[in-house]
């Protein structure tokens, strides 16, 4: 049967008896949806989210096309057949929008359980679309079926729309809370885009249909505005593509999209007859072209910036590889230094000792001094190598600490006893004093602690020509700290030297002037060891020639 | 392709095919639906709806509403109800699906008013 009051359309959808806004709202939305959906899919069809975006776009484009047919066709059978698709397509749009947003957020497919829920929600719409529950008749006078739509069926697919809006909002909010700042911006853009689209689409289409049923808005033209939601969605998808490469389609694709949009809007002039619509289209064209130009400029800048970042990243990667090689070489060198330099040094020291002890026959007095020098030099070299090895271990994080409980006061006493003879030889006196309120028990690496005190005491002996070296062991049980002060009457330091002596190779000018041998690594190593055991080392001096005070601080056992 | 992973796809496609086929069969082939249209109405004997011929409603016409099976109407009148006497009443309809609705004066003010002569005749 045909609606006698209306004329037959041209090519199924073109009719002169339609509201002005019909083609303006439908055609761009259909073409843009198809363009975006197909473009994204064809550029990267492996990605599930691209497939789902295509399905969402296809559902929308099909719905809008069917709706266009309903506005222009006059055959009751064709109209009812097309009408039965509206609910199905709207429901698919709801469910696949949820599916799409889920995959966009989680970057993986939904579980089988959720798929079954989707299926159960869609099944009634598909099963009853052809029955009287959906449509029972047709009004030939009005040329529509609003009065014959099943209320239950219509409300069901409208509710699916509402469900999609709420479900998506919940998914977005939940993910937004946990996301990093970059993904938060993507979620925000996707959220605004899809929620605006679904809200405009479902609310206006439902309200228009309801008003038509109760006879207030007989032609339901309010639904036209709902289709503009798709344009909003596409704009946000475009931003996601350009700024975040969300669909991995490349920047050129986004530029092509802008151009397509401008061509599309401009092409509407070919069929527009109404002046108001022409003005509206002109404004839209100008706005689209301007936005497109701005977007293109932004895209160019972004490409430039991205290329620069890419270049820097490549250079950084190369530098990293080179650094790893150097690090490996350094480790190899350290290994060589450790095993191949130390062994001959041990031999040199050992044989020098044997010679001095007369193992190879009696030694003339003349030979004593050179042998002594050989021994000292070998010891210095061995200590230097040990310093280098320690620095290497500290920097590589390979320094091992074996913690145990011991009495610090006793250890300091032993070290002082060991060094006393050497000090006397230099004309110096070592005085040990204690001022302890606790048992002086600490939990630290015994060997490393001894090494630190040895190092500090050696320095004091090295840079003191005359006078005394006072060693004071005292504690603060309240703060659970114990201190070893090594106070000398040596060359002293200025403030600049104090600031640099704990750095690698940091040797004061006074130290060089004193002609004392040293690598400049001893204090650096000592400080790092003390820090690793929860303590520190500080240095004080009144100035050059006024002596120095080095304080080792370590935590007491609580 | 694993059925479990693509359960949605494998179930939706047959359901879609089923829906399209059933809908096509019902609406296009069988014409299994009701149609509602305006039929001529004699204001002398019935309470008719009043329609406007133009936007200003300077010209009016009387009509009743007929609802019947599209298949019956299509069989008797073809594509259009214009100039089809079968469409104008339910008298010749044998399927009992035809229903005429006249304007109800108790609920609507826009019903046709019978001429005085016919009203007096009715009173006799």
Image: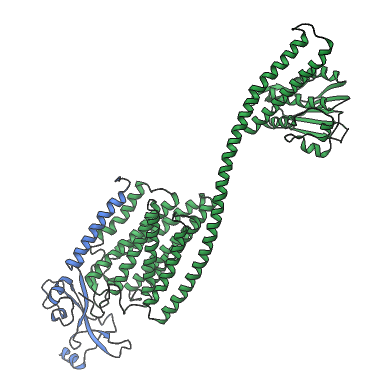
Chain colours: A green, B blue
In which quadrant is the C terminus of chain A drawn? top right
- Residue A359 placement: quadrant: top right
User: Is residue A439 among the parts visible in the rendering?
Assistant: no
**Residue A121 place in picture, x, y as percent:** 32, 55
In which quadrant is the N terminus of chain A drawn? bottom left
Which residue is at the front of the view, B96 or A367? A367
**Residue A292 place in picture, x, y as percent:** 49, 67
- Residue B42 placement: quadrant: bottom left
Above or below, B61 against A43 in this view is below
Which residue is at the front of the view, A355 or B104? A355
For image coordinates 10% across by 73% down, the residue present is B94
Above or below, A497 against B74 in this view is above
**Residue A365 place in picture, x, y as percent:** 84, 11
User: Is residue A355 among the parts visible in the rendering?
Assistant: yes
Above or below, A109 against A76 in this view is above
For image coordinates 31% across by 79% down, the residue present is A17
- Residue B13 placement: quadrant: bottom left
**Residue A322 place in picture, x, y as percent:** 58, 39
């Amino acid at each position: 049967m045909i609606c006698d009051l209306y004329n037959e359309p041209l090519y199924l959808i073109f009719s002169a008896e339609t509201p002005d806004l019909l083609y303006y709202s439908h055609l761009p939305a259909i073409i843009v949806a198809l363009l975006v959906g197909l473009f994204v899919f064809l550029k990267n069809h492996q990605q599930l989210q691209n497939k789902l975006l295509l399905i969402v776009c296809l559902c929308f484009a099909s719905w809008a096309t069917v709706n266009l047919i309903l506005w222009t066709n006059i055959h009751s059978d064709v109209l009812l057949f097309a009408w039965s698709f509206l609910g199905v397509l709207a429901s698919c749009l709801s469910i696949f929008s949820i599916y799409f947003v889920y995959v966009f957020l989680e970057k993986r497919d939904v579980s089988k359980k959720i798929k079954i829920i989707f299926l159960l929600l869609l099944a009634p719409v598909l099963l009853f679309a052809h029955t009287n529950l959906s449509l029972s008749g047709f009004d030939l006078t009005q040329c529509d079926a609003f009065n014959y739509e099943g209320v239950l069926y219509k409300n069901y697919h409208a509710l699916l729309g509402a469900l999609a809006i709420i479900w998506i909002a919940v998914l977005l909010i939940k993910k937004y809370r946990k996301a990093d700042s970059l993904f938060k911006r993507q979620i925000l853009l996707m959220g605004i885009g899809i929620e605006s689209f679904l809200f405009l689409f479902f609310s206006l289409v439902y309200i228009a249909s309801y008003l038509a049923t109760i006879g207030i808005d007989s032609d339901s033209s309010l639904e036209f505005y709902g289709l503009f939601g798709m344009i909003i969605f596409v704009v946000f998808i475009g931003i996601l593509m350009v700024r975040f490469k969300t669909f991995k389609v490349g920047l050129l694709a986004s530029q092509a999209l802008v151009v397509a949009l401008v061509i599309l809007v401009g092409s509407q002039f070919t069929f527009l007859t109404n002046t108001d619509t022409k003005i509206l289209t002109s404004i839209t064209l100008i706005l689209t072209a301007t936005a497109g130009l701005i977007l293109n400029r932004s895209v160019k800048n972004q490409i430039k910036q991205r290329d620069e970042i890419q270049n820097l990243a490549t250079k950084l990667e190369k530098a990293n590889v080179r650094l790893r090689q150097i690090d490996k070489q350094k480790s190899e060198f350290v290994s060589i230094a450790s095993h191949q330099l130390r062994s001959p040094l041990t031999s040199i020291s050992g044989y020098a000792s044997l010679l001095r002890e007369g193992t190879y026959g009696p030694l003339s007095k003349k030979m004593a001094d050179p042998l002594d020098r050989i021994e000292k030099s070998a010891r210095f070299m061995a200590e230097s190598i040990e310093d280098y090895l320690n620095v290497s271990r500290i920097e590589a994080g390979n320094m091992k600490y074996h913690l145990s409980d011991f009495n610090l006061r006793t250890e300091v006493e032993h070290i002082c006893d060991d060094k006393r003879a050497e000090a006397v030889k230099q004309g110096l006196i070592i005085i040990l004093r204690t001022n302890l309120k606790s048992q002086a028990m600490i939990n630290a690496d015994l060997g490393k602690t001894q090494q630190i005190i040895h190092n500090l005491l050696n320095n004091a002996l090295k840079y003191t020509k005359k006078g005394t070296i006072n060693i004071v062991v005292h504690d603060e049980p309240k703060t659970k700290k114990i201190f070893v002060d090594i106070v000398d009457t040596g060359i002293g330091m200025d403030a600049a030297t104090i600031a640099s002596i704990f750095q690698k190779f940091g040797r004061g000018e006074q130290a060089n002037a004193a002609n004392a041998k040293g690598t400049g690594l001893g204090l650096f190593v000592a400080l790092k060891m003390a820090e690793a055991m929860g303590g520190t080392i500080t240095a004080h001096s009144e100035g050059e020639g006024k002596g120095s005070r080095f304080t080792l601080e370590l935590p007491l056992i609580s | 392709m694993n059925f479990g992973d693509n359960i949605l796809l494998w179930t939706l496609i047959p359901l879609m095919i089923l829906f399209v086929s059933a809908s096509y069969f019902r609406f296009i082939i069988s014409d299994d639906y009701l149609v509602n249209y305006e039929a001529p109405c004699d204001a002398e004997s019935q309470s008719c709806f009043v329609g406007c011929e133009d936007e200003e409603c300077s010209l009016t016409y009387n009509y009743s509403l007929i609802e019947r099976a599209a298949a019956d109407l299509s069989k008797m009148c073809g594509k259009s109800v214009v100039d089809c006497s079968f469409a104008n009443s339910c008298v010749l309809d044998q399927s009992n699906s035809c229903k005429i609705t006249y304007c109800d004066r108790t609920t609507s003010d826009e019903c046709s008013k019978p001429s005085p002569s016919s009203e007096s005749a009715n009173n006799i």
